[in-house]
Image (cartoon, rainbow, N blue to C red):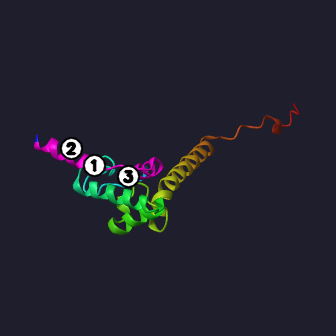
Amino acid sequence: MIAALAMAIAVGADTPLPDAGEEARAQGLMREIRCVVCENEPVSQSTADIAVDMRRTIRSQVEQGASDGEVRTYFSDRYGQFVLFRPPARGLGILLWIFPFALLAAAGGVIAMRAVRGRRAGLTPLPDDRLDGDGG
């Protein structure tokens, strides 16, 4: 009963923005930013106290006219790149984005080389019947 009351208070503490467009932007950002307490859960779904504070901060920044990028930067500067579900592809992050594709390309190259080598190794030259002088 106490847990349900605490959950209702936490959910009730979230007051939507009066402008529907700004609220939609804020909701989108809340789905992109990870709760720092809950493992792999966006702040939009978390009931942790810090997630409630993060939602308030997002709404406050959106209401003050901050861009989506500025809101993301605020949270990544404060909590690190981990807080973003889609971190920017720069620096070491580029390797994390490129590595799976490079690995697939390398595996495809190895498979193709083995297929070509296997085909060459299995071929034996056919005898040429025309060399014996029959002219046939």
Q: Which mark is residue 115?
A: none
Screen quadrant of the C terminus: top right
Question: How far is the residue under mark 2 from the one under mark 1?
Answer: 13 Å
Q: Is residue 96 left or right of residue 122?
A: left
Residue 23, image x, y percentages: 42, 50
For the magenta stretch, what is the residue range? Answer: 2-27
Task: Determine whether label 2 and label 1 are within 8 Å by CB.
Answer: no
Q: Is residue 14 left or right of residue 69?
A: left
Q: Nearer the viewer, residue 126 or 49?
A: 49
Task: Answer with the quarter of the image where residue 56 lies.
Answer: bottom left
Nearer the N terminus, badge 2 or badge 1?
2
Residue that lies at the very extreme toward the left in this rendered image = 1
Looking at numbered disc 3 in the image, what kind of residue is underneath it?
A: Met
Query: Which residue is pictured at 40% across the width and 62% down the height?
Result: 61
Q: Secondary structure at mark 1?
A: loop
Q: Secondary structure at mark 2?
A: helix
Q: Is residue 115 magenta?
A: no
Residue at image mark 2: 8
Q: Which mark is residue 46?
A: 1
The dominant secondary structure in magenta is helix
Looking at numbered disc 1 in the image, what kind of residue is underneath it?
A: Ser
Instruction: Between label 3 and label 2, give the one nearer the viewer.
Output: 2
Looking at numbered disc 2 in the image, what kind of residue is underneath it?
A: Ala
